[in-house]
Amino acid sequence: MFQFLIAVRPLGLLYGSAGAFLSPENLVGRSGTKFPPDAATLSGLILATNQEKPFVDDHHDLKLQLTVAGAFWAEKYDDPQNFYVPIPQSRIIDETKIDEWEIREGEWCRQKPDEDIEASYTWQRIRSWEKRIDLVKNNNVAKVPWTFVPILHPTLEEEQRHVRTPIDDDDRGSLFLENAVQMQEDSCLVYLSTHRLPDGWYRFGGESHLVEIKSEELDSETIKLLEKPIKKSFALICPAVWGTNNQSWRYPKDKNFSNERPKMLTNRPVPFRYRIGKKLGIGRYAVPAGTVYVVKHPLEEQNNTWWKFPHEWFPQSQAQKSVNDRALPLKYLGCGLCLPIEIKGVD
């Protein structure tokens, strides 16, 4: 289970240009903008840091055990434990009202269909997950704390610290436009991890942007929520790719799901891609965070928390050749992290 919370505070701007499927020629396009950096970014930083300055004696064991999930965010770097997670699709929260989807006669229905309620908020505090009232009044919901800021960057000479001068007509020039990200003052990104990363300053998320990182033991209240058994309904707080290396599905191919298709509340799929070392994983589309699943029968005890989900539900990066190799299912990158949720009309 996750034992640590890792808080990442930007020391200036962060990188937000590289959408999952954008080409270099379309670097500044907004259609594929990707932010915040996913769990694979932090996982790579932890492994690279341990290779350069070991803080875990057995690096091979770290590679086999490390699991990271996120990204989430918190308003205060000094108090990141009550961080924000995506609001389930079953909750519609505007500036003053809350509506919810429920199950009636086997179908999804809104509790207040005649009221004009549109979703104004997309994130809620982790400690308010099981609350259903006063979410707005008690400041338990929020909008994203970041904005995109286009900035011009100089291209430096490889071996000299001055702007590169164009050489010929085919040269790309000495400036490029970065679609950077500016977060609200004192806010930070939050990740969950099985291992601690030493506190300090790091290059994080592309274009060598500096961040300050600290690790804390994860709050016991959050651990209890993550360990709470899932019965018939749950909501994703991280995007999910279910399936095999060759196929992606909307839900796991398991008897709990496949005997009768689960009822889902979801949105359009999101691009999902990760890099392991110098190898770039294939581009996929993921079921977005916030998606709600309702299954006909309660999940079996051996599968009733995300941590117990079988690796076979997720694509693998490679075949496991021996017990010393780690076939990397996307689960080790927090894929499909979810929490139980109450849906009215579900037994």
Image (tube, rainbow, N blue to C red):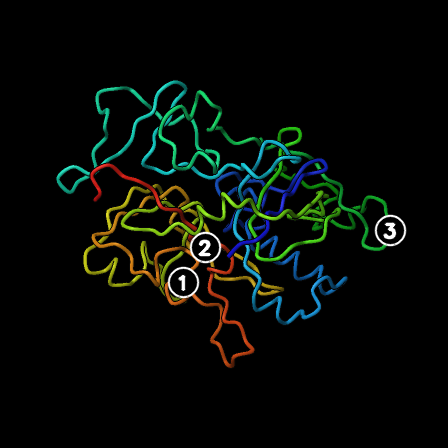
Q: Quadrant of residue 113?
A: top left
Q: Which of marks 3 and 2 is in front?
A: 2
Asked if residue 282 is positioned above or below residue 326 in the image, the reply reads above
Q: Which amino acid does label 2 sit on?
A: Cys
**CB contact under 8 Å: marks 1 and 2:** yes
Asked whether residue 120 appears in the rendered view, the answer is: yes
Classify 10 Å Cα crowding around label 2: few (below 14), some (14-19), many (20 and above). Answer: many
Residue at (34% x, 25% y) in the render: 98
Q: Is residue 15 above or below residue 51?
A: above
Q: Which mark is residue 314?
A: 1
Task: Tell me the distance, in whole angstroms, between the alpha carbons under discs 1 and 2.
Answer: 8 Å
Quarter containing the C terminus = top left
Most distant residue in the left direction: 105
Q: Name the residue under label 3.
A: 160
Residue under the point 66% across and 57% down: 46
Mark 1 lies on a secondary structure that is loop
Q: In this view, does 46 lie to the left or right of 322?
A: right
Front-most of residues 152 and 345: 345
Q: Quadrant of residue 9?
A: top right
Q: Which residue lies furthest to the bottom in this view?
A: 322
Q: Which residue is identified by label 2?
A: 335
